Amino acid sequence: MAARLSLIALAILLALVPLFAVSSLTFLAIVYAKSLAVLGIILLLQAGQVSFGHGMFFATGAYTAAFLGRAMGGGGDLALLLVASVGTSLVLGLIVGLFVVRYRYIFFGMLNLAFSMVLYSILEKFFHLTGGSDGLRIRRPTLFGFGFDRGQFDLLLYYVMLVLALAGAYLVWRYLKSPLGQALKAIKTNETRLEYIGLSARSVLLVGYVISAVLCGIGGAGLGLIQGIATPEYTYWTRSSEFVFIAILGGVGHVAGALTGTFVYEAIRTYAAAFVADSWQLILGFVLLAIILKAPTGIVGVFETIAQRRAAARATPANALESANLESMK
Amino acid sequence: MSGAPHSAAAAPRILLEARGIEIRFGGVVAADGIDLDVYEGENLAIIGPNGAGKTTFLNICTGYLRPLAGSVRFNAREITAQPPRTITRLGIARAFQIPQLFSDHTVLENMLLAAAVRQKRWNLLKPLAGIAERDEMIALLELVDCAQYKDKRAGDLPEGHRKLVDIAIALALKPQLLLMDEPTSGVASADKFEVMEILVAALAKAKVSSVFVEHDMDMVQRYANRVAVWSTGKIKRAGPPKEVLEDPEVIRTVIGV
């Protein structure tokens, strides 16, 4: 109950941001868009699988918005662009997924990487179609026939991405609790038993993979719309690794890790860059080291542990001691 | 096939029908023309020395291994080399010698997942914990004396109880036929008979036929209606436990007195 209330409070707070911090709207919209992609990575991590190629779906979403916006003239319609991005990333997720769900662990990760780099090459080499490394411009779309000036559009995009990020996290949370989501987690521990209760591990993983692809597709379309451009860099391997990095930073055990991790990551990137110029990557490197060594459950995991300890301490002092001992034994 | 169970009037229906099963691993012949019928309502014990091909036979029946020759039919339907998931859905469940659990899930979640698959509960927004089979699964856990562990992580259970949960998962699928590989190995020897007693009663109540690999001859004597003796990929003898276990040849090669 307390968790639910604090979530509602957070949602209201985020919804009120435009009233008191207009200057950070774009920053936060980027956080929301990227968090959708990170959510996709966290989802796959439930099955114990890491993809180093989900940038390909991110790029798919962005280029879909670019191509469709251009084809419709004048930037197209925002809702239509987002729906189309869902469609294209779903189809590509299904096609690539049919291949990659046959593999696990390092092979799964590398095969995804290979697919994403193939897409990168295509986007870069076919410059007549794709604009090459310059990418494609994404013009400001309309929504249901209404046009917007720059400020209005930033505000609109802020709310659209906020709703999508929160809805995405909520729906993934529900999915992971459902039988198919629980079966996805079971891939990590026992595929043999999964087969022997009548389920195909590959099909279970494919469902998760397609959902994660769609999340990345929406996120990519979102970032493309915010930045007004889609470039091959969206599917470059550093982009895909960034999602994995953020997932570990935020905490892979919980959907809240996506938004939390992305917020912290982008904040460090933006503000550390302002203070210490070129060494923000160094700072992020140390942050990741600290997380992996000291808090492998990520930022959200740290908060969870603190909350549990408090609850235990409130129960009885003896129990608290015991749980603290258990924690240190892990 | 020799030694049909129950000499009673009506011939019992054949549930599983294996014919001419052959398989080799390199030079080792693990199945060399196995013919076996499993009848509805029976508890068939498979005995034999290590390496005789007992587990291999279970692996072939459940589609884990593809035989070089021969066929398996279940309810008169060809199931040879179908994948385990298909065979499981047709009504053959399996319990393993080494328990196969979802170790990161709780014991109850293990059961619920099996029930959800059985009932095809694929709604992505309905939680597993809330499915209608919850009470049924808790009752099943009570039956195998594991209900007190229902909220424990399955991987943290002691070996004996993991074994029982493994069997309970198989029962959760409501199979027609249950294949068990040494169901009571790993269970404390003091509890063995009690566990088997409960299990056999549960099988009878749910009208589940069973095939179980067993090394303990007392268990076979007590709980099998029929026993098949394996030796180097062949069935040496099959029949009622009383007759088979007193056969001097069987005593010499299998029981090893």
Image (cartoon, grey):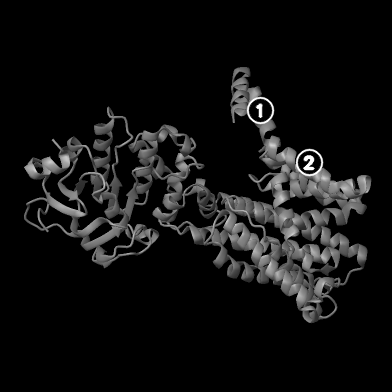
Which residue type does callout 2 highlight?
Phe
Which residue type does callout 1 highlight?
Arg
Closer to the camera, A104 or B206? A104
For label 1, the crowd category at 10 Å Cα-Cα, with few meaning under 14, some 14 to 19 and many 20 or more, is some
Residue, disc 1: A309
Closest to the camera, between mark 2 and mark 1, is 2
For the C terminus of chain B, the quadrant is: top left
Residue B5 at what x, y percent from top left?
12, 51
Residue, disc 2: A286
The residue located at (43%, 44%) in the rendering is B101
**In this view, which residue lies farthest toward the front?**
B27
Q: Is residue A330 left or right of residue A163?
A: left
Residue B220 at what x, y percent from top left?
18, 40
Q: What chain letter is assigned to the residue under label 1? A: A
**Which numbered disc flags the more N-terminal residue, 2 or 1?**
2
Placement of B200 over or under B10, stated as above or below: above
Which type of secondary structure does the marked residue at label 2 adopt? helix
Which type of secondary structure does the marked residue at label 1 adopt? helix
Placement of B127 over or under A77, stated as above or below: above
> Is the residue under label 1 in contact with that under label 2 (CB below 8 Å)?
no
Residue B241 at what x, y percent from top left?
12, 43
Residue B242 at what x, y percent from top left?
9, 42
